[in-house]
């Protein structure tokens, strides 16, 4: 009997997922536990494994299709095995003599008449969207998918082959050879999965908020010396490293407790300010950016924060984060310091009203009175939503982060 490959629920708020890529094709043999299809929801991508050994006998959802949780993506069964059409009871497909009473016969006859007069089109969501864009009449398209389902490829083929009927006029047009554009090398790739989610959210962020960025530099010469002594005194292990990012996170958390207006969410026509800090820490992955959340970060020590950031980084790079670990942040920090970038303009992570951008530390000459000294300077860029925060309180908050970093003993008190 065929076994369904189900769209799983990967988080509390998840209602649907997107098919990113089929790793196996119809007719391919699969082993139990072997990856069959890649799906995504929000910023999580996950490969689904085969629940049983067999053959992928049907694919119900094409790439880019959006599927509700609990619905089948495909079926695994024995070679040559067929399945009933999803959503239709077996009794209607193969009625038995005992079950065929009068009401059932009438329903089946009505269904048959309706099918003859107006056949129901089986169309994938992606194909339906594309047909609207390309102005293709789906009733004229022949489906090549399972059970005659119309796919995106069918719509594209129909769009390329359909002809425009000429008007009832005879117009002589002199044909001229069309210029052939030069061949340009390149690769075209569809925007899907995590990259698609990020692109949509960043665009919405800039469209729906009033973003302004303030910049300053913090003298972290003492912080670097303090970090060195702390790492020498603290028993370093694989979970705690006491990196500069850990200190910056603690500095931002302490500043948020004194400037609670920055620890807020702007949603609809209301601003919610939080007593606890739920800190998002952006982590760059090859396929995009994820923001794990340190819940109740204001109640954690510097070493605990370091441990959680390191753990989140490992999980993110192993694609083992779940939706719960990526939700609920009230403020975010993001860094481009490892790439040699100084100041930049970080983009808000709505509905948060603030995000701190961290640049790379550089050695610069700084005057102390009449004396010029070499100091380690850290660029900081604060983007905030001007709808919720004015410039003065935002500047005061950024100054508090700077003060915390320049007096590192404050971070461990």
Image (cartoon, helix red, strand yellow):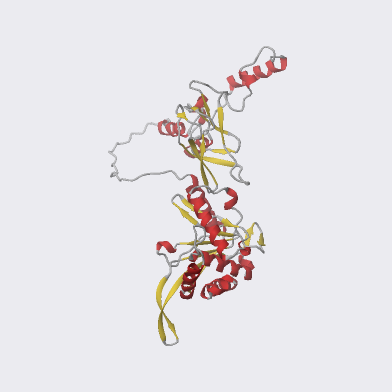
Residue 386, position in %: x, y?
Answer: 58, 66
Q: Nearer the viewer, residue 36 or 397?
A: 36
Point 55% across, 71% down: residue: 401
Residue 253, position in %: x, y?
Answer: 59, 66
Q: Nearer the viewer, residue 301 or 393?
A: 301
Confirm whether residue 229 shows in the render: yes
Residue 281, position in %: x, y?
Answer: 53, 59
Residue 164, picture quadrant: top left
How many marks the image carries: the answer is: 0
For this orientation, the residue located farthest to the right is 102
For the C terminus, give its image quadrant. bottom right
Q: Is residue 113 above or below residue 405?
A: above
Point 63% across, 63% down: residue: 299
Point 65% across, 62% down: residue: 276
Q: Nearer the viewer, residue 171 or 149?
A: 149
For the N terminus, give its image quadrant. top right
For this orientation, the residue located farthest to the bottom is 370
Q: Is residue 404 above or below residue 145?
A: below
Confirm whether residue 212 shows in the render: no
Point 48% across, 75% down: residue: 222
Q: Is residue 255 left or right of residue 288?
A: right
Q: Is residue 217 above or below residue 84?
A: below
Residue 9, position in %: x, y?
Answer: 60, 41
């Amino acid at each position: 009997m065929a076994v369904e490959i189900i769209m799983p629920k990967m988080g509390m708020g998840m209602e649907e997922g997107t098919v990113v890529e089929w790793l196996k094709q119809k007719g391919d043999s699969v082993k139990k536990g072997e990856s069959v299809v890649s799906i995504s929801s929000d910023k999580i991508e996950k490969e689904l494994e085969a629940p049983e050994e067999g053959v992928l006998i049907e694919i119900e959802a094409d790439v880019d299709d959006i599927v509700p949780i609990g619905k089948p993506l495909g079926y695994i069964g024995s070679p040559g095995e067929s399945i009933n059409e999803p959503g239709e009871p077996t009794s209607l497909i193969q009625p038995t003599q005992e079950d065929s009473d009068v009401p059932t016969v009438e329903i089946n006859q009505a269904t048959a008449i309706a099918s003859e007069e107006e056949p129901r089109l089986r169309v994938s969501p992606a194909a339906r969207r594309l047909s609207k864009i390309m102005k293709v009449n789906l009733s004229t398209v022949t489906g090549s998918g399972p059970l005659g389902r119309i796919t995106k490829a069918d719509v594209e083929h129909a769009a390329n082959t359909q002809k425009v009927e000429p008007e009832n006029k005879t117009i002589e047009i002199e044909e001229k050879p069309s210029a052939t554009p030069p061949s340009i090398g390149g690769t075209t790739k569809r925007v899907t999965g995590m990259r698609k989610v990020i692109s949509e959210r960043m665009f919405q962020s800039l469209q729906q908020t009033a973003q302004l960025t303030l910049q300053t530099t913090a003298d972290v010469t003492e912080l670097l010396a303090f970090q060195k002594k702390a790492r020498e005194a603290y028993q370093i292990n694989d979970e705690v490293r006491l990196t500069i990012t850990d200190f910056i996170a603690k500095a931002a958390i302490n500043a948020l407790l004194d400037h609670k207006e920055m620890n807020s969410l702007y949603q609809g026509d209301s601003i919610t300010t939080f007593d606890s800090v739920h800190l998002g820490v952006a982590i760059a992955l090859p396929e995009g950016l994820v923001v794990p959340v340190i819940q109740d970060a204001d109640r954690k020590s510097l070493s605990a924060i370091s441990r959680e950031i390191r753990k989140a980084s490992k999980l993110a790079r192993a694609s083992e984060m779940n939706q719960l670990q990526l939700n609920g942040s009230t403020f975010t920090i993001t860094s481009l310091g490892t790439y040699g970038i100084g100041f930049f303009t970080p983009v808000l992570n709505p509905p948060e009203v603030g995000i701190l951008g961290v640049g790379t530390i550089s050695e610069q000459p700084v005057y102390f009175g009449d004396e010029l000294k070499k100091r380690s300077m850290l660029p900081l860029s604060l983007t905030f939503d001007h709808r919720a925060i004015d410039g003065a309180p935002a500047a005061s908050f950024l100054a508090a982060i700077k003060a915390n970093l320049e007096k590192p003993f404050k971070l461990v008190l």
